[in-house]
Structure formats: C-alpha cells, structure tokens
C-alpha cells in the first residue's frame, strides 16, 4: 500500500492506530453547497471543453494552459496548481499512467491514446473536483471497454449514495462491477471528502475493506468519488518525478470522478457535464 502525503487523489489509508486522531467529517450548509455548485460547474465546464478540443498532435501542456486560463476567467483558481508542490492545473495521465501525470510540452497526444484529465477549481473558499477519461480517436476494443466500465463503475457507486447508506455500499457496487467485467480496481488511491479543503474526511474506497470505519452517509456531505480501473494488475508504482503513478504491468488504466452531494433522498452530482 503506497502512502504519499503529496498526492492529489487521496492515497488509500488502510490502517488506523489509537494515536491517529479521527478528523471531523464536515456537513455543508445551504450557502456552502451553493458555492460548491459554482466551483463544480467551473470544473465541469473545463473538462467538457477539453474533451471537445483534444486531438492528436496536441500536448498535455496545451490542455493544461487551456484549463488554467478558463478556470481563472470564470473567477476561480486552479485547485491543483501548487498543491504540495504540484506544478500544473490538471493531471494528465496517458495509457498506463494511472494518476497524477504532469503536463509537459514534450508529451504529445496520439491517436488511440487513453487520456485521463483531472482538475479542480477553488472559489469563495470551496473546491470542486472531477476527472474524465478520453478516447483519443479510435481506440482498441479492449480500451473502449475499459473506459466504458470505469465510467459505469462511477455511476454504480453514485447510485448507492443517500443519507443513511454506507461508504461500503458504494465501494462494493464499484468493485463488483469492475471485477465482473474482468478488470481490477486500484487500491493504492481512493476518493475523498471535498469542500473547504481539496481533501477532507472520509476516504471514499472503491473496494470493500474492514480496515477503515464504514462511515454512514449524512445529508450535506460532499464526496469526490473516483474509481480507477486497470486492464491488468491493480498494483501501481510511482515514477522518478515523485508524482506519476503507472500500472506495474504496463497495462491501460481509466478513471472517472465526480463531486457528489449527499441528500436525504439520494444525491446530486455537482460536477455533472450533461446540461452544460
């Protein structure tokens, strides 16, 4: 289990000792939720624009420049840039890169690539956070299936969200869908609470575990749910840049993420892109 304090997706923490204080899970007020709706709308807008503009020959630095420009134009600041020293406004991870890929002017996007773009926006004291996976041009049937299953897994998890349900309900739904389709769930990174801080309690697991409390969901919680799905092994390793995580067997990886509000009757996807 990799534990890194400087990673943008919450590193999975499977152990809890008596010396580790239990942090409070924040419930957002109506006013705070309204602010988060705007932060999340900015994120959703940027990701939709990137999905529409990506084409072979561009670089990941091109996407990063667009994201930062648009986030600032809409009255926010990039959540990721400078976060524990991360140098960019997006994470751009291609093919076997799992998470936290650093945009680079020399990193060209090619036809058939599986491109993950993760970004966040911060305004009026609150963050929004979301990730998409983009099939660049025509990808292989297996890559297309991987992307589809990863997105389906996100929504399988979201469908479990409502006040009174438990984190393991959504974790189990995600895990079952991924494994039933022949893929693996990355266990080195999890989702997380999000709001006043980019990463808050609780950790939002994408697989069943008894090694962390099975938190009961309450209305007003805001969660970044983000399953990461690998074509092959679930095991990852970190490259020399200290950020980029890759699959240990060089297989493809896909990720989707939404910021989700827990309500009494269900959920609201704050980073929804469908109606923009």
Image (cartoon, helix red, strand yellow):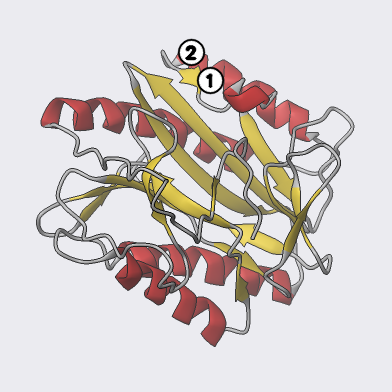
Horizontal side of 212 relative to 77 (left or right) equals left
In the image: residue 120, left or right of residue 99? left
* CA–CA distance in space, label 1 to label 2: 5 Å
Based on the displayed image, in which of its 4 quarters is residue 208 positioned?
Answer: bottom left
Q: Residue 216 location, x and y as percent?
A: 21, 61
Q: Point out residue 197 in the picture as x, y percentages from the top left corner.
A: 39, 29
Q: Which residue is mark 2?
A: 73
Looking at the image, can residue 47 be seen? yes
Q: From the viewer's side, name the closer residue of 245 and 69.
A: 245
Callouts 1 and 2 close, C-beta under 8 Å: yes
Where does label 1 land, which residue? Answer: 70
**Which residue does the image show at 67% across and 70% down from the upper left?**
234
39 vs 186: above or below: above
Residue lying at 37% horizontally and 38% vertically, measured from the top left: 194
**For mark 2, does the 10 Å Cα neighbourhood hold few (<14), some (14 to 19), or many (20 or more) residues?**
few
In this view, 163 is above or below 5: below
Q: How many marks?
A: 2
**Residue 178, position as x, y percentages in the image:** 53, 77
Q: Is residue 147 above or below residue 85?
A: below
User: Quick one: quadrant of the C terminus?
Assistant: top left
Secondary structure under the numbered disc 2 in the rendered image: helix
Q: Quadrant of the N terminus?
A: bottom right
Q: Residue furthest front?
A: 19
Front one among 11 and 276: 11
Quarter where residue 149 is shown: bottom right
In the picture, the disc for residue 244 is none
Residue at screen point 47% across, 71% down: 207
Estimate how packed mark 1 is, as few (under 14), some (14 to 19) or many (20 or more) residues with alpha carbons within 10 Å: some
Is residue 258 in view? no
Q: Secondary structure at mark 1?
A: helix
């Amino acid at each position: 289990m990799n534990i890194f304090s400087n990673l943008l997706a919450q590193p999975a923490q499977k152990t809890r000792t008596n010396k580790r204080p239990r942090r409070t899970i924040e419930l957002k007020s109506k006013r705070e939720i309204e602010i988060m709706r705007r932060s999340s709308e900015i994120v959703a807008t940027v990701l939709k624009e990137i999905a529409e503009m990506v084409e072979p020959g561009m670089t990941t630095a091109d996407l990063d420049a667009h994201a930062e420009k648009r986030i600032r134009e809409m009255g926010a600041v990039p959540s990721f840039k400078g976060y524990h020293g991360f140098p960019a406004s997006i994470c751009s991870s291609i093919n076997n890169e799992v998470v936290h890929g650093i945009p680079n002017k020399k990193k060209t996007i090619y036809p058939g690539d599986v491109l993950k773009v993760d970004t966040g926006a911060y305004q009026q004291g609150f963050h929004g956070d979301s990730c998409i996976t983009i099939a660049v041009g025509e990808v292989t049937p297996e890559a297309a299936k991987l992307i589809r299953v990863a997105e389906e897994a996100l929504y399988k998890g979201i469908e479990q969200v409502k006040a009174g349900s438990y984190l393991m309900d959504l974790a189990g739904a995600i895990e079952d869908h991924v494994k039933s389709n022949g893929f693996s769930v990355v266990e080195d990174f999890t989702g997380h609470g999000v709001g006043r801080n980019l990463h808050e309690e609780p950790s939002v697991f994408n697989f069943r575990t008894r090694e962390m409390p099975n938190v009961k969901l309450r209305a007003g919680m805001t969660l970044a749910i983000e399953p990461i799905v690998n074509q092959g092994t679930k095991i990852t390793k970190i490259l020399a840049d200290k950020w980029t995580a890759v699959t240990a067997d060089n297989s493809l990886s896909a990720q989707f993420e939404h910021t989700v509000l827990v309500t009494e009757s269900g959920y609201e996807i704050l980073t929804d892109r469908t109606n923009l």
